[in-house]
Image (cartoon, grey):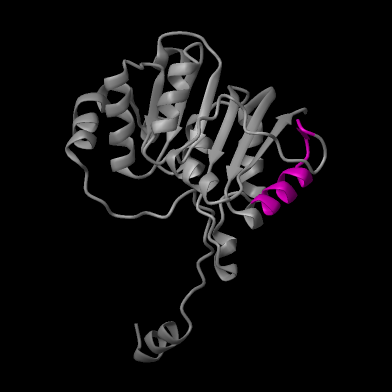
Amino acid sequence: MSDSVVDEALEHPPIVKREIKSFVLRAGRMTTGQRRGWDECWDKWGLQKEDGPLNISEAFGREAPVVLEIGYGMGLSLVAMAEAESDKNFIGIEVHRPGVGCLLNECQLAGVNNVRSYCDDAVEVLRDCIADGSLSRVQVYFPDPWHKKRHQKRRLIQPKFIEAIKPKLAMGGVIHLATDWENYAEQMMEVMTAAKGFNNQEGEGQYSPRPDFRPLTKFEKRGHRLGHGVWDLLFERTE
C-alpha cells in the first residue's frame, strides 16, 4: 500500500455504524458469593447464546408461562419475583458476570430453581435464541438513563428495540418498563405509544401503578424517602 493511500485512510477513517446495544460493559471483580454462584450454578442454570435457539421446556424441565428480564443488575428482585411466582419460568439476561454470579448464588441460597440466565447482549439473545410468541412478559427495570442530553441516543428503549421484542411476545403478552428518571419515562411513553400493535393497559398516555409482582428495590425505597418519582409502563401486545 502506498504512503499516499495510508495517509488518506488516516485522514478519512471509515464510518462504522453503531448498532444498538443493551449494555455498556464495565469491569468488576466478583465477591466470594458471586464467584460461588458462578462456579457452582452456571452449569445448571446458565444459558449460552452460542447454543442457538432455546428449547424453553427442556431448559426448565416443564411447560409454564415465561417471563424475560433484560438487565437485572444483581438480580435480587428477579429472585424475589421467581420465588413469588413459582408457576412461571424466568429468563434473565445480564452482561455483567458479577451480577450473574450474584443472581445464581441468591437462587441457590433461596432454593429457587425456576430462573435461567444468559450472560450476554440482550439484542443478540433475542435475535438468536428466543422463539417468536414464546414470552408472556418482558420486563426492563431502571435501565441506564443516560441523563446527559448528548448521550440519550444510547438509551435502550428505542423503536428498533421494541420492534425486536414484539414478535417474541405471545398475543396478550406484556412489556413492563420502569424508570426513576422522568425524562426517560416520557421517552418510554412516546416510544411505546407510537409502537404498532400495543395497548397501554392503563389508558392512553397514562403511567401504571407499580404492580404487586415488581418488588421495591433498596434504591427505589431510598428514592421514595427522598421524594423521587418512579414511573411504570405496561403495554400489552394486541397484534
Say which quadrant the C terminus sits in. top right
Task: In this rendered view, identify the residue nearer to me: 117 or 146.
Answer: 146
Quick check: 153 left or right of 84? right
Asked if the stretch drawn in magenta spans residue 201, the answer is yes
Quick check: 212 left or right of 172? left
- Quadrant housing residue 235: top right
**Residue at 53%, 11% in the rendered image:** 64
Task: In this rendered view, identify the residue nearer to me: 169 or 84.
Answer: 84
Percent of width and height locating residue 148:
55, 67
**Residue at 65%, 42% in the rendered image:** 162
**Residue at 52%, 61% in the rendered image:** 18
Instruction: Tell me where the magenta segment starts and ends, as one range.
Output: 185-202
Asked if the stretch drawn in magenta spans residue 219, the answer is no
Q: Residue furthest bottom?
A: 4
Percent of width and height locating residue 85:
50, 16
Percent of width and height locating residue 154:
54, 59
